[in-house]
Image: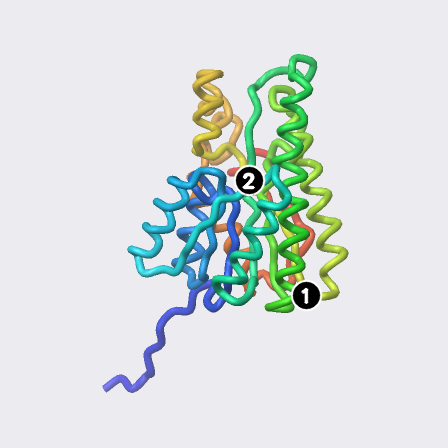
Amino acid sequence: MNNTPTTSPVGLLSGKVAFVTGAGRGIGAAAARLFAREGARVLLTARTEAQLKAVAEEIRADGGTADHVRCDLADPDSVRAAVDRAVELYGRLDVAFNNGATGQDPGPLDELPEAEFDRILAVNLKGPWLAMSAEIAAIRATAGRGAIVNNSSIGSLMANPWLPAYGAAKRGLNSLTASAAATYGPEGIRVNAVAPGTTLTEMMEDWEARSPGIIAQSAAQTPLGRAAAPEEIAEAAAWLLSDRASFVTGTVLRVDGGMRA
């Protein structure tokens, strides 16, 4: 007779409260589902209420704990209120995945309208800065220690002639990530980023519609020969947020199928 005690597997994020931006679709929705399966209580945020509600209901139907709040990354008050809501609901904040972003119409930088440049930087660079500021305050006030992951892009690590403002914003986000890691590491708050390669999200599908063949072209430049599923990026973020990555901070982790190898 086997008297070995049996134990339930412990999830990567068991006992943690997670905050996810851009959680209504794509990588953010995949991350919210995964974080809940890995044991976290999750607050989903994005601009589109209907998408958020659908993902949160799906998580709860699967046995997870999730709620949602509408949030516009270009609105400082909205960002702070969303982070505060996580603490109101769950009593603390442990980890955050700053995934929310906006794309740009592909084209050279001299053809990009100034207002469009400002919008891209407001959402993709200022938005994560606002979110990190609020998240760090919430982690300090509740959990005391924690982790943040920002969603960057492989395009931040190379020339990006067709998405110049997007690439510039994401490269700036890499710098913010490193600066935050150095600043808050002594307090036990880790800050990292993931840099996805070509990923089959709605944003990528929109680019494919404007530039037919771009997904196949990107896959041809990727040693693994394909695009990523959103879930594959979410897995990397989950690990970085977990205690299993306890000595990792200030890194931009390429999740690109070897594109930049």
Numbered mark located on residue 108 in the image: none
Q: Is residue 96 above or below residue 174?
A: below
Q: Is residue 170 above or below residue 184?
A: above
| Drawn side of residue 57 relative to residue 29, left or right | left
The percent coordinates of residue 70 (x first, y second) are: 48, 44
Q: Secondary structure at mark 2?
A: loop
Rendering quarter of residue 181: bottom right
Q: Which residue is mark 2?
A: 72
| Drawn side of residue 30 relative to residue 19, left or right | left
How packed mark 1 is, by other alpha carbons closer than 10 Å (few <14, some 14-19, many 20 or more), is: some
User: Which-is-in-front pick, marks 1 and 2?
Assistant: 2
| Drawn side of residue 202 relative to residue 193, left or right | left
Q: Nearer the viewer, residue 95 or 232?
A: 95
The furthest residue to the left:
1
The three-letter code of the residue at mark 2 reads Asp
The percent coordinates of residue 140 (x first, y second) are: 66, 65
Residue 211 appears in the figure: yes
Residue at position x 64%, y 43% in the image? 76
The three-letter code of the residue at mark 1 reads Gly
